[in-house]
Image: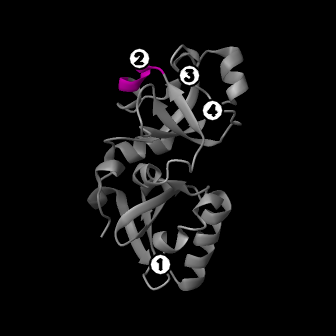
Amino acid sequence: MYLCRCLCGFTPKESISGQTQTKSSVARGIRQKVLDSYPMLEDEIESLFPKKQPLFLVKCHDRIQMIHSNGEPLFFNEHDGPWIPTLRLLHKYPDLLPHEQVDKGAIRFVLSGAHIMCPGLTSPGAKMSPAEKETVVAIMGEGKTHAMAIGRMKMSSEDIQSKNKGIGVDNMHYLQDGLWQTKTLT
């Protein structure tokens, strides 16, 4: 929940507290964690993390970290949690995360940084994939091709359908937020 507020106002000058080139052992560890979380990237991992290019770890305020290669932000995490792909990376590899689709009425709210409410996920026009609580998901919009946000499930998809009340998904990173507008981190 806190991550969204940090990323929506993200600016490299103000948000980054430090940046270091990782040692090769640290880079291998990050690479392995990414592969463990996203096994479908196995064929693409060399292009994402070339062995001959340095991998940088960017420390931001409020215990948020990002990794980038060639200045392009690839993944972020909070409090040493799982590595979460940026929307730009998700657009290149759309099947990295399970998809949850909101109805047309919810799109403008999601794009302004609002959390995704249960009724927006259960109404006509919305589609839900089975997902457990705390799962990181891609938020799709009805009639849209690409993900418009990345969120973390606050409750399982079964609970969202049965309760149909409250916040279903925390919005963590959305189109046009501060991280999206940051093209490079160098």
Mark 4 vs mark 3, CA separation in Å: 13 Å
Residue 139 is labelled as none
Mark closest to the chain's N terminus, 4 or 3: 3
Q: Amino acid at mark 3?
A: Leu
Q: Position of residue 186 (x, y in %)?
A: 30, 70
Q: Secondary structure at mark 3?
A: helix
Q: Quadrant of residue 73?
A: bottom left
> As drawn, is 121 to the left or to the right of 159?
left
Q: Is residue 76 magenta?
A: no
Q: Is residue 104 magenta?
A: yes
Judge whether 36 appears above or below 132 on screen: below
Mark closest to the chain's N terminus, 3 or 1: 1
Mark closest to the chain's N terminus, 4 or 2: 2
Q: Which residue is mark 3?
A: 121
Q: Are marks 1 and 4 in contact (CB under 8 Å)?
A: no
Which class describes the residues within 10 Å of circle 1: few (<14), some (14-19), or many (20+)?
A: few
User: Which residues are drawn in magenta?
Assistant: 103-108
Mark 1 vs mark 2, CA separation in Å: 42 Å
Q: Position of residue 95 (x, y in %)?
A: 55, 48
Q: Residue at 35% of width from left, 30% of height from top?
A: 112
Mark 4 vs mark 2, CA separation in Å: 21 Å
The secondary structure that dominates the magenta segment is helix
Q: Which residue is mark 4?
A: 154
> As drawn, is 184 to the left or to the right of 140?
left
Q: Are marks 4 and 2 in contact (CB under 8 Å)?
A: no
Which class describes the residues within 10 Å of circle 2: few (<14), some (14-19), or many (20+)?
A: few
Q: Which residue is mark 2?
A: 105
Q: Amino acid at mark 4?
A: Lys
Q: Nearer the viewer, mark 1 or mark 4?
A: 1
Q: Which residue is mark 1?
A: 50
Mark closest to the chain's N terminus, 1 or 4: 1
